[in-house]
Image (tube, rainbow, N blue to C red):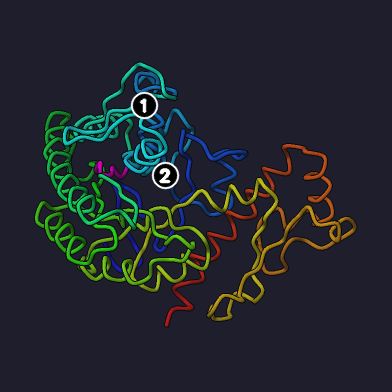
Amino acid sequence: MVMGQLFIRDRTLHLPTFLPDATSGYVRAVDSRDLEGVGIQAVVMNTFHLMQKPGSSTIQAFKGLHRFAGWPNLIITDSGGFQAYSLIHQSEKFGTITDRGIIFRPEGRDRKVILTPEKSIQLQISFDSDVVICLDDCTHIDAPRAIQEQSVKRTIDWAQRCKTEYLHQIEQRQIEESARPLIFAVIQGGGIHDFRKKCAEALLEIGFDGFGYGGWPLDGDGNLLEDMITLTRALVPDKYPMHALGIGHPINLMKTYRRGYDIFDCALPTRDARHGRLMRFTCPTNTRLTGSDWMEYVYIQDKKYIKDQRGISEFCDCPVCDHYSIGYLHHLFKTGDWLYKRLATLHNLRFMTQLTERLPNNDV
């Protein structure tokens, strides 16, 4: 990585960057050309979900996710550790987490699926991912100390197993250095400084191309865990890119970027769009972003927009703001037409790419 650029295979990822969640191989309501048109450079897909639907054999029949999804640009595949954690902590009927790996029962069925660190890497490389992420043992920030300690121990152990399998796959498949996917590890430790430090130091010793912030990034009141996010970045040398996993609220993205993170992903902007919450800047492109008043939300269902002939934002260059009025979007939303979801998603994604384009020029 050099300043503002991460080189992956034969491509360059310009940093900072926001990646929409294409969890099951697609970003809802839009296609690949739509994504490229609003400046999306890469997407995040999820191994945990893809191995179930459409299934690894289907993806491999297409020789990977790029051809399967019709997406020619970069793909990062999350290991699925967070998704498995979320399901299992809802109810034990969904599975268990052991030192061996994650045992889960899809949709609570009797059939068991085992996701080990080795299998996670095998799947991601067979999917032709550009960045693979190690399987990690996720915890809640408020989990007891004993649980956090176990999580760190497992995360380190699993990362070592992932790295060993990664090197084996590279050698077995005879992948040249210039063509290999990058491999990232995830730093766990909850809200305990010593555990975060222990995890980061061990992962650095194993050796990875980049790192991710592990665990839910918000406290119980929905506030960004700024101290822990700052500490975790400080534990990793600047030469390594840092992925702020799951951070995508615009205000939190800005705060996290200013603490040294480069890559962001979240389902929030696209989910908000589909449900009628649109983002817009309140200031021109050359205005420095401070505080939180540089953006606001448009709630498209509001009756005040019925006859509004303006675009969503005068500071947006997306195709939606260029061609459609808020009044028309209000009409589409109220009638439940799918065109609304596509247009709203495009606008919110362009807001996010505009934000990441603006941040370097607005940095302190």
**Which residue has dot 1 on it?**
51
Q: Which residue is more in the foreground, 148 or 162?
A: 148
Please say if 352 is above or below 47.
Answer: below
Q: Residue furthest top?
A: 110
**Which residue has dot 2 on it?**
44
Q: Residues within 10 Å of mark 2 (few under 14, many from 20)?
A: many
Q: Nearer the viewer, mark 2 or mark 1?
A: 1
Residue at 86% x, 61% y is 304
Q: Which residue is more in the foreground, 158 or 128?
A: 158
The image quarter containing residue 17 is bottom left
The x and y percentages for residue 88 are 36, 36
Say which label, 2 or 1, has the lower sequence index.
Answer: 2
What element does badge 2 sit on? Answer: strand
The image quarter containing residue 291 is bottom right
Q: Which mark is residue 232?
A: none
Q: In which quadrant of the rendered image does the C terminus lie?
A: bottom left
Mark 2–mark 1 Cα distance, whole angstroms, equals: 15 Å
Residue at 25% x, 54% y is 188
Q: How many marks?
A: 2
Give the amino acid at mark 2: Val
Q: Which residue is more in the foreground, 94 or 47?
A: 94
Residue at 65% x, 76% y is 283
The x and y percentages for residue 122 are 23, 30
The x and y percentages for residue 210 are 25, 55
What element does badge 1 sit on? Answer: helix
Residue at 35% x, 54% y is 12
Is residue 139 rendered to the left or right of residue 218?
left
Q: In which quadrant of the rendered image does the N terminus lie?
A: bottom left
Q: Which stretch appears magenta? A: 130-136
Q: Is residue 131 magenta?
A: yes
Q: Residues within 10 Å of mark 1 (few under 14, many from 20)?
A: many
